[in-house]
Image (tube, helix red, strand yellow):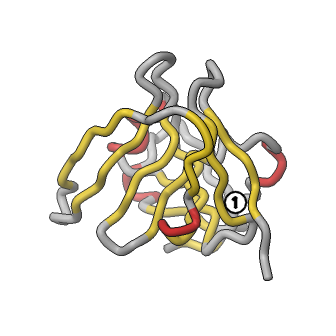
Amino acid sequence: MSGSVMAGCLCGEIRFSVADLPLMQVLCHCTDCQIISGAAYYCAYLVPLDTVSLQQGEPARYDVVADSGRRNSRRFCSSCGSRLWAELDSGVASVNGRCLDDLDHFQPSHNHLIGSAQSWCQINRDLEEI
C-alpha cells in the first residue's frame, strides 16, 4: 500500500497531502500551462483525485474549459496565488509538482504537447511523449 506526500502553498496557508506514487509525472508544454506557471512548462504530478486530502485552509477555485472541451477546476491559494492542483473531468488531479514539500519527489517521466513549446525551450527528448 502506498503512502502520501505533503504539499502546500508559498505562504503556508494551504496544506494538503497526495499519493506518493503518482500515475504519471509530466512536463506539460500547452499554452494554458505556460501561462499558469509563468514558465516554459508546468510540472504536473498526476494522482487520482480521491488521494488529494486537504489538511489546512481552503483553496480558491477557477473553472476553465480547455480547447478540447475538457473541464478543468484549478485550485490555488487566494493569499499568495500559488497554483496547487487542477481537478480534471477524468477523476485525476494535476498537482503542481513544485509545491510538494520534497521538491526532489517530482521526477518527470513524460512530455506533453511539445508542439506548443516555445521555440527557445530546450526539451528533454529522453522523456516519453504523450
Q: Which amino acid is tagged 1?
A: Pro
Please tell me which residue lies in front, 40 or 96.
96
In percent of width and height, residue 111 lies at 56, 63
The residue to which callout 1 is attached is: 108
The correct choice, above or below, for 129 with respect to 53 in the image is below
The number of numbered badges drawn on the structure is: 1
Please tell me which residue lies in front, 79 or 109.
79
In percent of width and height, residue 91 lies at 39, 72
Q: Secondary structure at mark 1?
A: loop
Quarter in which the N terminus is drawn: bottom right
87 relative position to 11: left or right: left
65 relative position to 92: left or right: left
The correct choice, above or below, for 118 with respect to 72 in the image is above
Residue at image coords 38%, 57%: 87
In percent of width and height, residue 28 lies at 49, 54
Please tell me which residue lies in front, 98 or 62.
62
Q: Residues within 10 Å of mark 1 (few under 14, many from 20)?
A: some
In percent of width and height, residue 88 lies at 35, 63
100 relative position to 60: left or right: right
